Image (cartoon, helix red, strand yellow):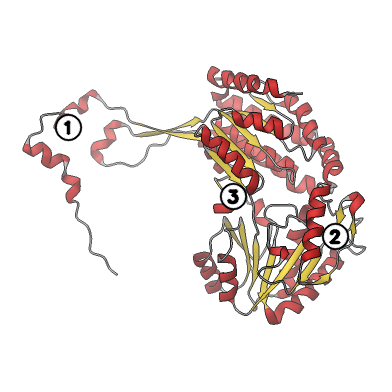
């Protein structure tokens, strides 16, 4: 068990390991990645049990959405690592080729990963996979809101990963504060914008580079010509993961006013199909993480001026809250004040696609924009006229299954990239290099003082580069 007093010693020990060169070996990194995959695979029952105790998470959801992703990406990262680490040689003009311009891939150093509570397995080990692949040493700080899971990590991680290079530090605000007082070579934080500002301020004191994976209100725009029934089914499926407690959950739906009631009926139909006896006691529906989050969600519902059309049952003692759908939600409603991060889905009626685009653009940039449309011009318009970390057409949540796509936010929803090589790149320093041969001295003579008229002409030649005329 780490204490506040031991945290600087842990950081210093990891830095010593990094400087020893232990993590630079590619076979060593591959071994650690395979060990990470073995840990997730071998300890899956303990992990499922811990997440059920902390979050009421369904076992299948943990296996499919967390453990499977961690195992698959760790193995694939190990397999692709030899290619990722290769030095690159950019194309240059002929006279510079003898200089051997090279881009080396260097690990950044000793890094800090602060992971959240909502998908704690995936969001702890996804960045860790990239840090291991890059050759960094790591402190992993899991969330105190999932105490059973976090304690389990402290017990099992040293059994699989080299404790000289990777350490789990548990605790709450005091321990996190102490971690943030220290200098790191990169900080990877996943969570909310309020805490992100605290983390970023601490990092700025040391000029520490950061990745912020945040969230925000990810909207759904439904083209009135699209199959409303299918849209409702796919939106509902994405919303129900972890009881809506995920950064890419559909937060609110923008639909043409004359299609709103049709959408509501479709939601009711598919909800009844997903949960024939309701979600309150369903083993396939998660719980709210804490009493404070439960009270926050019920407070938002109590203040809405929209019309509740699917009233979810609740059980405060067990922190259980069924999906609630609210229609005719207006711009200033309580349900649009902040990221919902729970099983509430507001429907905002609009009169046109223009109004939907304006509604989205008037708010902070979301982590993802969902849109349901078969019209290519509508899709292209949304790509060109909106701004979000990602844009997903005709589905929700499923983009997370594509490991080769970068996952990122923009503005209030965060910055920096992750997934597979993008996570590796996050923890990698690109070191530019040239190696000037002695034989190049004759061609370099022009740079030395004093400059002749001919030398000045050669040195300033780029100033007179021909500029093509504009075609506008």
Between discs 1 and 2, the one toward the N terminus: 2
* Residue ID for mark 1: 447
**Quadrant of the snapshot with the C terminus:** bottom left
Res. 47 in view: yes
Front label number (1 vs 2): 2
The residue drawn where x is 14% and y is 40% is 458
Residue 233 x/y as whole percent? 76, 67
N-term mark: 3 or 2: 2
Q: Residue 27: x percent and y percent?
A: 59, 26
Viewed as shown, does residue 461 lie left or right of 339?
Answer: left
Which residue shows up at 83% across the image and 35% down it? Answer: 148
Q: Nearer the viewer, residue 322 or 121?
A: 322
Q: CA distance from mark 3 to mark 2?
A: 29 Å
Q: Quadrant of residue 1?
A: top right
Residue lying furthest left: 453
Q: Is residue 31 above or below residue 223?
A: above
Residue density around tag 2, few if under 14, some if 14–19, many if 20 or more, within 10 Å: many
Determine whether, in the image, residue 96 is placed left or right of residue 347.
left
Residue closer to the observer: 244 or 445: 244
Instruction: Tell me whether the residue at label 1 lies in contact with that at label 2, contact meaning CB atoms closer than 8 angstroms.
Output: no
Residue on which disc 2 sits: 322
* Secondary element type, mark 3: loop
Q: Is residue 266 left or right of residue 472?
A: right
Mark 3 — residue? 407
The relative height of residue 325 versus residue 80 in the rendered view (above or below) is below
Secondary structure of residue under mark 1? helix
Q: Nearer the viewer, mark 3 or mark 2?
A: 2
Neighbour tally class for label 3: few under 14, some 14-19, many 20 plus, Cα within 10 Å: many
Q: Quadrant of residue 66?
A: top right
In the rendering, at what x and y percent does residue 440 appear?
21, 28
């Amino acid at each position: 068990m780490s204490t506040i007093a031991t945290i600087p010693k842990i950081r210093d020990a990891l830095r010593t390991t990094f400087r020893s060169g232990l993590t630079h070996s590619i076979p060593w990194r591959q071994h650690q990645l395979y060990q990470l995959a073995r840990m997730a695979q071998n300890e899956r029952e303990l992990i499922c049990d811990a997440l059920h105790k902390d979050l009421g998470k369904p076992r299948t959801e943990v296996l499919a959405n967390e453990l499977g992703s961690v195992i698959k990406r760790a193995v694939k990262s190990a397999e692709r690592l030899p290619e990722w680490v290769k030095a690159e040689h950019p194309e240059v003009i002929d006279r510079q080729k003898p200089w051997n311009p090279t881009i080396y891939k260097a690990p950044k150093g000793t890094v800090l990963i602060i992971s959240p509570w909502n998908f704690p397995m995936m969001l702890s080990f996804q960045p860790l996979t990239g840090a291991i692949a890059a050759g960094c040493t790591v402190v992993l700080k899991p969330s105190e809101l999932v105490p059973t899971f976090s304690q389990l990590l402290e017990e099992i991680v040293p059994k699989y990963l080299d404790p000289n290079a990777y350490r789990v530090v548990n605790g709450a605000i005091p321990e996190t504060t102490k971690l943030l007082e220290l200098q790191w070579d990169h900080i990877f934080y996943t969570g909310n914008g309020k805490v992100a500002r605290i983390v970023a301020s601490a990092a700025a004191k040391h000029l520490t580079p950061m990745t912020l994976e945040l969230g925000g209100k990810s909207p759904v725009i439904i083209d009135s010509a699209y199959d409303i029934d299918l849209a409702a089914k796919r939106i509902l499926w994405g919303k129900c993961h972890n009881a809506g407690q995920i950064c890419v959950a559909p937060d609110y739906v923008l639909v043409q006013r004359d299609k709103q009631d049709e959408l509501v009926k479709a939601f009711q139909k598919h909800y009844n199909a997903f949960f024939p006896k309701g979600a309150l006691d369903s083993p396939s529906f998660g719980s709210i993480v804490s009493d404070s989050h439960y009270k926050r969600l019920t407070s938002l519902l109590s203040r809405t001026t929209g019309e509740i059309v699917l009233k979810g049952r609740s059980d405060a003692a067990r922190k259980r809250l069924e999906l609630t759908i609210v229609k005719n939600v207006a711009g200033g409603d309580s349900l649009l004040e902040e990221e919902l991060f729970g099983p509430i889905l507001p429907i905002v009626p609009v009169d046109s696609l223009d109004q939907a685009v304006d509604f989205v653009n008037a708010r902070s940039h979301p982590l993802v924009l969902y849109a349901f449309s078969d019209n290519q011009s509508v899709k292209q318009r949304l790509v060109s006229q909106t701004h979000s970390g990602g844009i997903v057409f005709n589905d929700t949540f499923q983009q997370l299954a594509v490991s080769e796509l970068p996952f990122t936010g923009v503005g209030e929803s965060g910055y920096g990239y992750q997934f597979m090589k993008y996570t590796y790149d996050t923890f990698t320093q690109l070191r530019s290099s040239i190696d000037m041969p002695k034989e190049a001295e004759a061609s370099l003579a022009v740079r030395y003082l004093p400059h002749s008229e001919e030398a000045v002409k050669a040195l300033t030649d780029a100033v007179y580069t021909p500029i093509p005329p504009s075609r506008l």
